[in-house]
Amino acid sequence: MSDPLQIIDVEGNLTGTAPELDNSTLIQMYTAIVRTRAFDSRCMNLQRTGKIGFSVPNRGVEATSVGAAAAMDASKDWFAPHYRDFGMLFYNDVPAEAMFDNMFGNSDDTAVGRQMPVHFSFTEPLKWLSISSPRGTQIPQAVGVSLAARKRGEDAIALTTFGDGSTSTLGFHSGMNFAGVMKAPTVFLCQNNQWAISCPSSSQTASESYAIKGEAYGVPSCIVDGNDVLAVYVAMKEAVDRARAGDGPTLIEAITFRLGGHSTSDDPTKYVPAEELEKAESEEPLKRFRAYLINEGVLTDESADKIREEADAEMLAGARAAEAKARPVLGTIFTDVWQEQPAHLKQQMEYCIKHYSERDEAVDENGEFPL
Amino acid sequence: MSDPLQIIDVEGNLTGTAPELDNSTLIQMYTAIVRTRAFDSRCMNLQRTGKIGFSVPNRGVEATSVGAAAAMDASKDWFAPHYRDFGMLFYNDVPAEAMFDNMFGNSDDTAVGRQMPVHFSFTEPLKWLSISSPRGTQIPQAVGVSLAARKRGEDAIALTTFGDGSTSTLGFHSGMNFAGVMKAPTVFLCQNNQWAISCPSSSQTASESYAIKGEAYGVPSCIVDGNDVLAVYVAMKEAVDRARAGDGPTLIEAITFRLGGHSTSDDPTKYVPAEELEKAESEEPLKRFRAYLINEGVLTDESADKIREEADAEMLAGARAAEAKARPVLGTIFTDVWQEQPAHLKQQMEYCIKHYSERDEAVDENGEFPL
Amino acid sequence: MSELTMVQAVNDGLRTIMTEDESVLVLGEDVGPKGGVFLATENLTAEFGEERCFDTPLSEDGIIGVGIGLAMNGMKPVCEIQFQDFIFPAFDQIVSEAAKMRYRSGGQYTVPMTIRTPYGGGIRGGLYHSQSGEAYFAHTAGLKVVIPSTPYDAKGLLIASIQDPDPVLFMEPKALYRAFREEVPEGMYTVDLSTVREVTQGGDCVVFCYGAMVPVCTEAAKRVKESRNKDVRVIDLRTLMPLDEESILQAVKDCGRAVVVHEAPRFCGYGAEISAMIAENVIEYVEAPVKRVAGFDTPFPNTLENYYMPDARRVLDAIEEVLDF
Amino acid sequence: MSELTMVQAVNDGLRTIMTEDESVLVLGEDVGPKGGVFLATENLTAEFGEERCFDTPLSEDGIIGVGIGLAMNGMKPVCEIQFQDFIFPAFDQIVSEAAKMRYRSGGQYTVPMTIRTPYGGGIRGGLYHSQSGEAYFAHTAGLKVVIPSTPYDAKGLLIASIQDPDPVLFMEPKALYRAFREEVPEGMYTVDLSTVREVTQGGDCVVFCYGAMVPVCTEAAKRVKESRNKDVRVIDLRTLMPLDEESILQAVKDCGRAVVVHEAPRFCGYGAEISAMIAENVIEYVEAPVKRVAGFDTPFPNTLENYYMPDARRVLDAIEEVLDF
Ligand SMILES: Cc1ncc(C[n+]2csc(CCOP(=O)(O)OP(=O)(O)O)c2C)c(N)n1
Ligand SMILES: Cc1ncc(C[n+]2csc(CCOP(=O)(O)OP(=O)(O)O)c2C)c(N)n1
Ligand SMILES: [Mg+2]
Ligand SMILES: [Mg+2]
């Protein structure tokens, strides 16, 4: 496979052909990256202070998510995402508060506090399929979603994203295979952040790249510099256009680096070599995009700082608002299992509500999450 | 990928470099193909006359199995086979009677009549892992078997075979991936007979070949004419040598054709185009190998006919002997679940034996198998 | 009205709902031109085209995963798993995904998907073409599990399953596919997904069963009538989840004696739940042990399958034991 | 002797048997340098080398499939599934292959493999880091299912499982991993794989439980003693398959009243089997409904997990109800 597509280098210099994007889109992309980083660090803070139980660092991978989101048409397309894709939500202006509702698992959480933090689910402002913990399961689902659209004659497509580790799952194998055979309008984006928890690529696959796995399924593929938001955008745009035109799926490997731990429960210093981390830190996506936009006159130092300050303020306010909300009511344990609640669940619900509302015993709320 | 490796063409002419094999090995290979075909047609006959319930036609694919078996060292290597691999057993001189014991599911069957026909299991004269119906499960198992040998410092290797359809299973994905990463001494042989029951390759994969799937796992691969027993042997030998030398796994795609139905319950005329079948029939492996061996002076018409007659006689005798044997005793339902029989199974066994030995009611033995 | 076998009734049900509702799709291995290995999907591709009934690669995980995606985006997929024994590669998609999608998304995403699969013994299929895995699925909140025992019910329950807003595992007793014919109405009709069917009336003992065990239990009931002049109430559970618990408990109250029958292994089988329900709720009415007649706790054998599967005589023994207690 | 937590006891058990028996290998996701996400395999790679304890690709199907192969060829693999919730991609390899290999090969090939996996709630893990799937496996003939509730048992049962000639699913109650310490002998010892453990003595009511529910039930028993001066016998089942049925039935005969407790959903859960066994064999001794206290029949929630999981008070209620009947 050829070298990763790059458009702006680590210093922010143009090394390729920039896509034609208007300034407002470029700023939207930049803002999404900044907001993602602000959200992420707010979450780290909330976790360290014991206010939420868990988060998944996004530091370093924001450009991959944002570049991808920018190539989609969120008014009709579908997202079957990886958990490490906060940037797609921010690009589409999901309010921070809605995301914090999930982090706190409160009564406004669209997942009704049933899932762990970072397991977002949205139908508005974008069709973002409920995130699952089991790795890879979203991949064939994305294929099905996209085929349904095609069967109805719509030109909507589906994007599914996943980590490098997730290419080893059955979902990757079946999803890619079905998409190839059925020429599904699906884009597969592998966010190669070099790690699956503590396992580097060398223990994940012996293939020369993740992109080359497309060969096994007759799915064209390419590699991009995942820290270069414009390169991601360009590769994604091409793949989205192909899918929309009925020319089938594409696999994109975006090479980036997980600059934090796997999650708030993980200590990466145990296994990530310090030199590697240092090098990756120097290649991170925000700094270079900022430099590029300032070079190009799209931003100034002041306007960029302002975006940063607004994002910080937004996150602080969103977190506070979400924290203040009540937890879901007890009955929510028993709803949404089926559309109609069967008799045995009604009984269990009545028992549960009666049981816990009658007593004053404190319920222990402890428990740590290891990963 | 390059053209399939071929050494003898459909007329039996040498088109490549013949491997150095002594005449007795060549005759062993030829005999195995002939015996496979004789066994196969005996089974068809037994099924049509209602004596056995089921078989899986091997007609057309014998060269792939036999060429592969000839490259192995059965005194130490392991087989994790496809069900359509009778030829490997005949090459290793498994007595026809032992195989018929399985076809009848009688008391001498190594699988104790517990499995359907063609689900052979042997430890002698070769380590042939018990065949499973669920497709693909044997693939990662072969990897594990071969790794165990390596961990003990043995130079034994494992061969796993599977159909084209089975490349879509999870076992293919995980087995190939683990083998690549762990450099397992495993040879993967895809018997591409063009069909998975009624599904042709076009509904199985969009990849340009099955062999190219090796790229996804960093596993080197090649394509051979699966109707050319010498080509299969040559490709296999190279793969076996690599594995034995510690140089890791290989994927071989052998292109052949299923000349019969998927099984005795299948009617392929419903979906296999007549022209395709006719062409495949003209390319079948036995005729060409016979012509080649006669050309080369290894066989004469007479000696070849004699092999055929002996095989027919062997199959008739083997089938008769197996048919005459009793079915397994009732208690065998309850043994081999665990090494030690737990209390609840002892009780169930006692109940069952008492219950059925006390009564004279006829037990209905009917039931057809659809595939 | 025509006299159909169960597998014809399934085929007719599919054709009927596909005609009615354009969003219904059929996918699976060999469901296309071949019409499925049991011919349950015969002619559907010819009639509705490849876009509506299509073959897939050999991957149950893909069939169900893609099915879930289709269902989340407005379709009503009917996925065929060729034999229930081959459903396990899709177990993760079924129990982790289909079953939990509505819950984990607060109802934002739902999976109106039906999984059809032949199950059970009786065709000399050995370990892997004979299993009865209903307990695995009935234990999984978020799934419905339906098992017909007659052609009429097969069509009506299948259409109801396809119309249901939640994922349904529709298990077809392959031993009954061609066992008998029955009048099956043409066109649309449904059978409710949470009612039991009283097969025979009686107040001396109740037998709970489903699928291919229904005719077996009915035969046993007949013999008890002959031998002891006792009236056995045979109840076909039909929908294992949701379950008509009230009718079950009422029958125990009425009869005081109960036997539970299934082909699947006994240990932690579906029958255990029925027994437990009885022991928990109506034990004061129970006058004899609650007996289970089930497959033995071993894998499914081949040559000896007829000694493995419960037959009328084994059910009869249990009924007599309970009556004599 | 040293005071160890359960997860330390697991680690010690692995180290002990790996020292003793060269054929024991450990494989799984992150079990190597990181030592596992719960640190159950900490330092094993450092101590025994990469050949004996190694990371795998993210594929449970591969971990178990390769594990089966290792086991068939003379090794004793200990496969870690990071959370029990992630075992389902390997379900086919476990139920179709590991469980049936000995049977289908007439004992020619066997699978002396142990699958270790943390299960259960208590860490705010939501739907996919909290499940208790024991019933799926206990229903599958050919598997053993073991669940310790103390550090001592964890080590002894784990070594026994690894030495066992058949596949064992070893489920570790993650809520108890660091809940308390206990004296654990150094070096080799085993706890038999088919005996229950009597946690408390008593003849007024018996409570059957396992894993993280053992301390919960013990607490409930204590409260019953305080509130009503009744003696509750708490029995830790420990090995769910094979099961010490005799001791279970004897306890019911002794006490006349029984409660069954587990975290997993009730419907078709493991408790149903215990109840069914009682209803089938010793119903004449039973003086009250056989109550089950279990997780509700929903997916596992996150924020409200403490209201989902059975606690001492829910168990207490059930015991009182049974005593008052
Ligand atoms: C089927 C399954 N097995 C194991 C896990 C535990 N687990 C959670 S994240 C993870 C690593 C994922 O790596 P990758 O796909 O590269 O994503 P990343 O976290 O690096 O973004 C693992 C093993 C899981 N969630 N699902
Ligand atoms: C997991 C699984 N799904 C479905 C089946 C049913 N089935 C039996 S053989 C077969 C086709 C296999 O095709 P291929 O791998 O090409 O082998 P061939 O029969 O052509 O030799 C199918 C779908 C199965 N045995 N296992
Ligand atoms: Mg990663
Ligand atoms: Mg094939």
Image (cartoon, coloured by chain):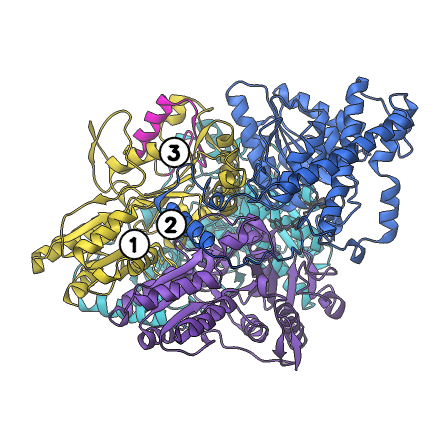
Chain colours: A blue, B cyan, C yellow, D purple
Element type at mark 1: strand
Q: Is residue B298 visible?
A: no
Element type at mark 2: helix
Q: Label 1 is found on which chain of the structure? A: C
Membership of C17 in magenta stretch: yes
Mark closer to the chain start, 3 or 1: 3
Q: Amino acid at mark 1?
A: His
Q: Quick check: D219 left or right of A99?
A: left
Magenta part of the protein: which range? C10-37
Q: Label 3 is found on which chain of the structure? A: C
* Label drawn at residue C164: 3
User: In which quadrant of the rendered image does the N terminus of chain D lie?
Assistant: bottom right
Mark closer to the chain start, 2 or 3: 2
Q: Label 2 is found on which chain of the structure? A: C
Q: Amino acid at mark 2?
A: Glu
- Residue on which the image places disc 2: C134
Mark closer to the chain start, 2 or 1: 2
User: In which quadrant of the rendered image does the C terminus of chain D lie?
Assistant: bottom left
Label 1 C-beta lies within 8 Å of the nearest ligand 2 atom:
no
What percent of the width, then of the height, locates residue A90? 71, 31
Point out the frontmost of discs 3 and 1. 3
Q: Looking at the picture, does residue A240 appear above or below residue C317?
A: above
What percent of the width, then of the height, locates residue B19? 67, 50
What percent of the width, then of the height, locates residue A134? 59, 46
- Residue on which the image places disc 1: C262
Q: Kindly report the distance in space between the C-alpha atoms of the residues bearing marks 2 and 3.
A: 19 Å
Q: Quick check: A231 left or right of C45?
A: right
Cβ atoms at labels 2 and 1 below 8 Å apart = yes
Answer few, some or many: residues within 10 Å of disc 3's Cα (few below 14, many 20 plus, some between 14 and 19): some
Q: Looking at the picture, does residue A233 appear above or below residue C280?
A: above
